[in-house]
Image (cartoon, helix red, strand yellow):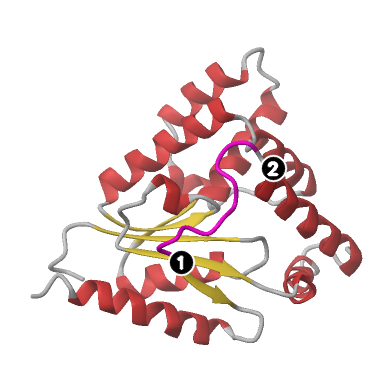
Amino acid sequence: MKYIKKFTVCIDGSSGSGKTTAAKLLGKKYGLSVLYSGLLFRYAAKMILKKNPKNNIFFLKKLFKKLNYNKLQKMNLHTAEISQFSAEIAKILKIRLIIKSFQKNYVFKKKKVVLEGRDMSKIFPKAEVKFFIVCKPIKIAAKRRWLQLKIKNKKISLSKVTKDLKKRDFIDKNRKHSKLERHPESVYINTAKLNILSVLDKMSKHVDKAVNKYGK
């Protein structure tokens, strides 16, 4: 990977599929910067809720121009309120365009990246590798997410987590702009019967194949 100047991996998929963990491990293995698009929407949601600006679009444009992405990973952006509101603002085209601009600038600066989200393959159709990750049936995804959330919130129920995942996927698949759907060139992976190392192994084979095309 050292001799390659530019390389992009897109990882799209449904909630609770394991794509975030996969992106992290893939980035670490190949020395790629990792951008979690969900954090950008969560940050936008958090700041709107906190500041209650008169004009959300003007406010976010200004906010994202000076955003240091590294700071987002240290913030608590996974509350129920933020999760719900971020799904709502993700429907708004003008907000999506602000975040899309940030994503493109990030890729331009970093050169070698893993992009994780819902529509990365649509925004970066020329990415060297594209993945679409799901975890079906959803009860498996819900149980995994529930076990994660229980660490911070012991009172959270499996039924609520299942309901929230179904709701989020429905919103993402049916919104007007940038629906959650598989790109025709993406590699489909169902993680339901796989552990994270098996997922990483499957993904690595496709990344290695793309890397080898460059030659040394």
Query: Horizontal placement of 105 versus 158: left or right?
Result: left
Q: Residue furthest front?
A: 184
Q: In the picture, residue 142 is in which quadrant?
A: bottom right
Query: Horizontal placement of 161 versus 176: left or right?
Result: right
Residue 170 in sight in this render: yes
Q: Please state which of residues 170 and 68 is positioned toward the viewer in this rendering.
A: 170
Q: Identify the residue under disc 1.
A: 131
Instruction: Give the CA separation, mark 2 to mark 1.
Output: 22 Å
Q: Please state which of residues 19 and 50 is positioned toward the viewer in this rendering.
A: 19
* Position of 122 relative to 185 (above/below): above
Q: Is residue 62 magenta?
A: no
Residue for point 25% across, 52% down: 111
Callout 1 amino acid: Phe
Query: Horizontal placement of 161 versus 174: left or right?
Result: right
Q: Identify the residue under disc 2.
A: 87
Q: Residue furthest left?
A: 216
Residue 200 in the image: state x and y as whole percent: 46, 80
Residue for point 66% across, 73% down: 135
Residue 22 in the image: state x and y as whole percent: 50, 71
* Position of 195 relative to 8 (above/below): below
Quadrant of the snapshot with the C terminus: bottom left
Q: Secondary structure at mark 2?
A: helix
